[in-house]
Amino acid sequence: MNKVHVVGAGMTRFAKSTRTLKDLAAEAVTAALADAGVTAADIQSAYVANAAAGLTTGQEMIRGQVVLRPLGFEGIPIFNLENACASASTAMHLGYHAVANGQYDMVMCLGVEKLATEDKTVGMAAIGTAVDIETLPELVAQMGSGPDSSKRSLFMDLYAQMSRDYMDRSGATPEHFAKVVVKAQGNGALNERAQYGAHLTVEQVLGSREIVAPLTLLMCSPISDGAAAVVLMSEERARREGRAGPRVRASVLVSGNHNDKSDPTSGSTGHAAKAAFESAGIGPEDLDCVEVHDASAPAELMAYEQIGLAEPGEGPALLDSGRTALGGDIPVNTSGGLLSKGHPIGATGLAQICEATWQLRGAAGPRQVDGARIALTQNGGGWLVDDSAAMSVHILSAD
Amino acid sequence: MNKVHVVGAGMTRFAKSTRTLKDLAAEAVTAALADAGVTAADIQSAYVANAAAGLTTGQEMIRGQVVLRPLGFEGIPIFNLENACASASTAMHLGYHAVANGQYDMVMCLGVEKLATEDKTVGMAAIGTAVDIETLPELVAQMGSGPDSSKRSLFMDLYAQMSRDYMDRSGATPEHFAKVVVKAQGNGALNERAQYGAHLTVEQVLGSREIVAPLTLLMCSPISDGAAAVVLMSEERARREGRAGPRVRASVLVSGNHNDKSDPTSGSTGHAAKAAFESAGIGPEDLDCVEVHDASAPAELMAYEQIGLAEPGEGPALLDSGRTALGGDIPVNTSGGLLSKGHPIGATGLAQICEATWQLRGAAGPRQVDGARIALTQNGGGWLVDDSAAMSVHILSAD
């Protein structure tokens, strides 16, 4: 296995916008190439993630070629990848393994998403295709989504149900979920690429409009557009060319499997994290910063337990301890997370890799984690039976 | 690089149908697993291609998980891949390299497609997303598609334009294109999985309804549903477990680049074929049978020249010689090709691999090429600027 480094990272600001897929991709790709000090002609293969643009823009099938050809990418293999909200991590996973296995020594991974549409229900309906659509009526009935369900993502109903279960198991309260949001928005306020970012109070979060109990509006990740890209290089080539960047220590992708609610490590996040720690030869205690898939606020607390930052049921206590805040010993979602930075679903996984890269380079500015050496990212997508349809965990180290 | 063998192949009959994605996938996957003598639990990673179902069925994002989970696939990485009509070859390419590189020793590649819809224009419009949709109005204007264009694929306009250019360069006539169809339908009549298959005359083909001059209805591949799957195994594991099957000698995927009309080897097929021959250490003269992407009849003649079976301009002469017919020394599209076997776009590339597998095993029944030892498949997808957006060439050998 060759060692693989992230030698370039670039992303747009995440936002609801009128920008096109091409425009978003161009900004992130150009920034990643410039950061790596290479050109499109140097890239040997491209892994392009998008989840929703087929339904929000009508562009299907060759989305990667459409956004990359105008930027000078010709002739190379281009892979168009979907895995719902884990699409970009899937691109990262394939790009990493292609370099690790020696097939290429320089590749690009891009995630780009267009979710904001004039008719808001189009974007919402697109997100709803991240389940088995034959089961949609049944899911909606189970969730009690009611007539307003087209105004929100089905996933917020799923998260609400999981949150109620989690409250029963862990003693978490809506106040805990609100504290996650306060932390996320505070971090987002330090990130110029974040969609939101603000200094909020628990009361403000609890007082925002109810989406599905116990979730309020501010506990749900927003509709976002955006793009994120990285350039990966083999260690040998990076050394030869004088490039540097964090090393990818583990890249794991799994699909869902049987998920025992009473054991937070039994589902896809637990499986992926375990495999990633084994691959990297480290444990949760070695992490300096973490980005988790907080598509809703309670998911961050669940992730603490699934990844092994906290014992089962101890997620709320870890949050209360302040250890996962900036300045704590294991800051989580320094970028603002999906809640504050935004969640352009096909770009999110690579935005997490960008944040990890910047933290490990000491380039995260006002949200820098002092002396960060090892980072983990967790990115899930879709829902099937009783688990995420896709789940990815990456571990990066400073060198 | 580990040697990789196709130890299992399975496909549905191709047809316009009311079958679902799940149902089609289940038949192909079950057949491929049974052919390999393995179960879903043995598969370490799955590469799933689909191009159009997002628009024809509404299912996006996690199409692979949706069709595979009911068949017992849990926990493994599942990659959802698009590359227009080359989607399934893209899945094959990634699956092959994952085994060749030693990441896995048993993987499955699946292509599944649902194009036939009650409202025929839905399937046609889906195919039309295999271009940069921003350029659609301009393309339609260039092509002079006119008011009936929603009743046919834009690609037939593109092919018609290429066919007229090709006639100018090579002296090919509509009779040549009709002869391609007569050959394809004759081969299809020997293939129980083909959508069509008939003993036609050149006059019947020329006399069928004009789609866009010089193409008549029978010169265009049909709307089809279907699925095709293969199980790939490393040679070491295949030997250990007593499995056998053709060896994959080359797997190349490229995207489009500058395509000089006057040089048939300058475009994506020429580039992919050259790279595949170099990788396999053979030349066109070593091939025993070939499957090419005859989405329209003239494309077969062009492919002869692009692959190197014929010199530039000599495609029509090669056809006239009878050498590419069953019984000739280099039979092309023994399966019936896209024209007769059908063209469920996200499944086509793997259906070609299935045909190559059966030919190299001596299991192709009445269409068997005597003593076939080396086969090539060519599968293209989408259109951008002046070339296919994606192009894949595979070479397989009997052992």
Image (cartoon, coloured by chain):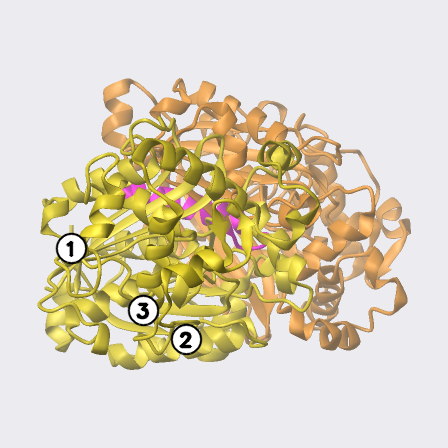
Chain colours: A orange, B yellow
Residue mark closest to the camera, 3 vs 2: 3
Q: Residues within 10 Å of mark 3 (few under 14, many from 20)?
A: many
Q: Residue at x 25, y 57 (%)?
A: B332
Helix, strand or loop at mark 2: loop
**Nearer-N-terminus badge (3/2):** 2
Label annotation for residue B2: 1
CA distance for labels 1 and 3: 38 Å
| Residue on which the image places disc 2 | B12
Q: Check if residue A251 falls in the magenta segment.
A: no
CA distance for labels 1 and 2: 30 Å
Q: Residues within 10 Å of mark 1 (few under 14, many from 20)?
A: some
| Residue on which the image places disc 3 | B186
| Left or right: B43 in relation to B18 | left
- Mark 1 vs mark 2: tell me if same chain: yes
Q: Nearer the viewer, residue B380 or B328?
A: B328
User: What segment carries the magenta color?
Assistant: A82-103
